Image (spheres, helix red, strand yellow):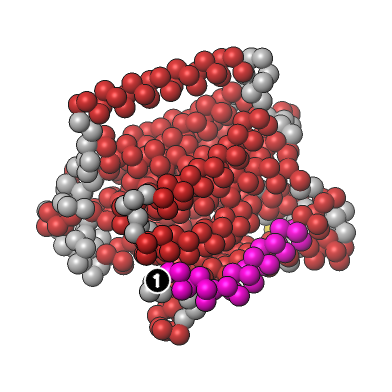
């Protein structure tokens, strides 16, 4: 950003592990935001389908799993709105604060006994709040450093460690309280977590952040404000009218809504690609790179479709198909949600070292994507074995779930950071920000598709479910590996 050097000079050179003190503010803001989100997510599925007598909402399991997927999809879609509000209206730090407030109130709604209506109100608040906070807190981290600062990558590594540490401890704390005592007490801990994040942010941002994230990069003019607010107002009125007509009459059911979002999950990224490819601002070389990006984007959708089922299908599997009492020690099914961030914390430095060690001999970007798909597919294939060996009527050793989470994290470390890097390199110059939004839409699209797929899972369909999805992922990985050289030629010099 144009003011990054100014921000950097106005902030002490060191103070938080040799980094600007503002990193402390953003580290703990994101730490507590992720604590609240992953803590809530660790018990939300169980809350939805447990019977009323057990403190749940008594929803159908298939519907509850579908809602979980749509929830995740909308969270990633909302980042587009958050980025626009920051760029055109509020700036980074104000957008982050308002996002945190919305998230906190979303968890507070869940903290009180309520109904399905309360659940949806909470979801709407958290979706909007996360969309405001998550993309913009990362942007403010970037504002702490000049582009030439050698500490920049290290600073982001420390920041992302905060993300994973928050996600790691949340299921252990919130999950335990929610499952052993009361779901609403667990949700209240999530609300407290976000409140602590806001406290850290409010009391340290003035002293540590300086002017980082305070400017609006591309503010709306007065005439633009009038046009935009008018369109937003008209859009809101139309949505309210449609809801007022379709919900009471039974036209807009939960299943219809999830189907609409699933369709949008395919249409929106497709429209993004078409607009960028056909734009006069996109050069011939950039069009070629966009064509190379498409198979990797599809691979990312396939990968995230499996990875995100860790909080849905594998969560259900942990709760109903896994032996949770071993050697006199009782496990909680929600604790398995800590495995993904745990493995990332330990393995991310190993992969970072590995790519540096291999240097120019490391696999190309398409081949790394193919490895990601192979590991993701294997993480589902191994889940066939317990049912094939002992049937679906017996409880399974928890190490099978540990192995599945471990394999998918290996795939994530091959694909996710590489995907971020490839997106910045392959993006058309005129659409650099939109292309990064497109990358995050790969996750939204995956979860939108999952909303229809997860309904097919049950103990009776377990073997074919894991086998078909895992097999498709492996097949796509092999196809991507076989065509990697051709894809690489379309990348036009990008490695």
Q: Tell me the residue at 33%/46% (across/down).
A: 136
**Left or right placement of residue 394 versus residue 13 in this view:** right
Q: Judge by depth and name the residue closer to the eye, 54 or 4.
A: 4
In the rendered image, residue 266, in percent from the top left (x then y), is placed at 57, 45
Q: Judge by depth and name the residue closer to the eye, 209 or 244.
A: 244
Count up the numbered dots.
1
On the rendered image, what quadrant is the C terminus found in? Answer: bottom left
Against 7, residue 452 (above or below) is above
Q: Tell me the residue at 62%/18% (across/down).
A: 247
In the rendered image, residue 384, in percent from the top left (x then y), is placed at 78, 63
**Left or right placement of residue 45 versus residue 434 in this view:** right
Q: Tell me the residue at 45%/69% (across/down).
A: 490
Q: Judge by depth and name the residue closer to the eye, 232 or 202.
A: 232
Residue 88 visible in image: yes
In the rendered image, residue 165, in percent from the top left (x then y), is placed at 45, 57
**Left or right placement of residue 46 versus residue 354 in this view:** right
Residue 45 visible in image: no
Q: Judge by depth and name the residue closer to the eye, 58 or 459.
A: 459
In the rendered image, residue 42, in percent from the top left (x then y), is placed at 59, 46
Q: Name the residue under label 1.
A: 492
Q: What stretch is highlighted in magenta?
A: 466-491
Q: Tell me the residue at 27%/64% (across/down).
A: 152
Query: Circle 1: is it few (<14), some (14-19), or many (20+) Cα within 10 Å?
Result: some
SS for callout 1: loop
Residue 475 belongs to magenta span? yes
| Residue 295 quadrant | bottom right
**Left or right placement of residue 495 versus residue 220 in this view:** right
Magenta-highlighted stretch: main secondary structure?
helix
Residue 339 belongs to magenta span? no
């Amino acid at each position: 950003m144009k003011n990054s050097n100014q921000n950097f000079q106005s902030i002490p050179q060191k103070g938080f592990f040799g980094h600007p003190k503002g990193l402390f503010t953003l580290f703990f803001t994101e730490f507590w935001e992720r604590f609240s989100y992953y803590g809530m997510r660790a018990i939300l599925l169980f809350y939805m389908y447990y019977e009323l007598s057990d403190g749940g909402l008594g929803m159908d399991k298939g519907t509850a799993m579908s809602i979980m997927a749509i929830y995740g999809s909308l969270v990633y879609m909302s980042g587009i709105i958050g980025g626009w509000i920051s760029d055109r209206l509020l700036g980074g730090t104000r957008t982050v604060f308002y996002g945190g407030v919305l998230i906190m109130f979303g968890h507070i709604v869940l903290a009180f006994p309520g109904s399905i209506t309360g659940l949806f109100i909470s979801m709407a608040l958290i979706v909007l709040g996360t969309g405001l906070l998550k993309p913009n807190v990362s942007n403010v981290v970037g504002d702490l450093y000049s582009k030439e600062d050698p500490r920049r990558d290290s600073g982001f590594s420390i920041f992302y460690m905060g993300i994973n540490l928050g996600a790691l401890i949340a299921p252990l704390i919130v999950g335990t309280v929610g499952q052993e005592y009361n779901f609403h007490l667990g949700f209240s801990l999530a609300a407290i977590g976000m409140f602590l994040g806001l406290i850290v942010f409010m009391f340290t941002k003035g002293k540590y952040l300086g002017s980082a994230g305070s400017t609006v990069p591309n503010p709306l003019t007065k005439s633009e404000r009038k046009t935009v607010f008018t369109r937003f107002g008209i859009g809101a009125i139309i949505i309210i009218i449609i809801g007022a007509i379709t919900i009471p009459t039974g036209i807009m059911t939960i299943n219809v809504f999830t189907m609409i979002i699933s369709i949008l999950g395919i249409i929106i990224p497709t429209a993004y690609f078409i607009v960028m490819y056909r734009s006069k601002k996109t050069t011939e070389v950039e069009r070629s790179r966009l064509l190379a990006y498409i198979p990797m984007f599809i691979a990312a959708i396939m990968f995230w479709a499996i990875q995100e089922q860790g909080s849905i299908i594998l969560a259900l599997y942990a709760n109903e198909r896994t032996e949770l009492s071993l050697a006199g020690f009782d496990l909680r099914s929600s604790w398995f949600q800590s495995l993904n961030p745990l493995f990332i914390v330990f393995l991310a430095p190993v992969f970072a070292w590995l790519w540096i060690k291999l240097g120019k001999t490391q696999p190309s970007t398409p081949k790394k994507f193919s490895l990601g798909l192979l590991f993701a597919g294997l993480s589902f294939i191994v889940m066939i074995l317990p049912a094939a060996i002992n049937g679906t009527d017996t409880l399974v050793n928890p190490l099978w779930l540990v192995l599945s989470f471990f394999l998918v994290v290996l795939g994530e470390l091959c694909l996710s950071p590489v995907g971020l890097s490839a997106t910045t390199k392959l993006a058309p110059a005129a659409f650099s920000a939109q292309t990064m939004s497109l990358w995050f839409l790969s996750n939204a699209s995956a979860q939108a598709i999952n909303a229809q797929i997860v309904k097919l899972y049950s103990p009776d369909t377990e073997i074919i479910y894991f086998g078909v999805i895992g097999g498709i992922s492996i097949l796509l990985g092999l196809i991507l590996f076989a065509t990697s050289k051709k894809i690489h030629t379309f990348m036009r010099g990008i490695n």
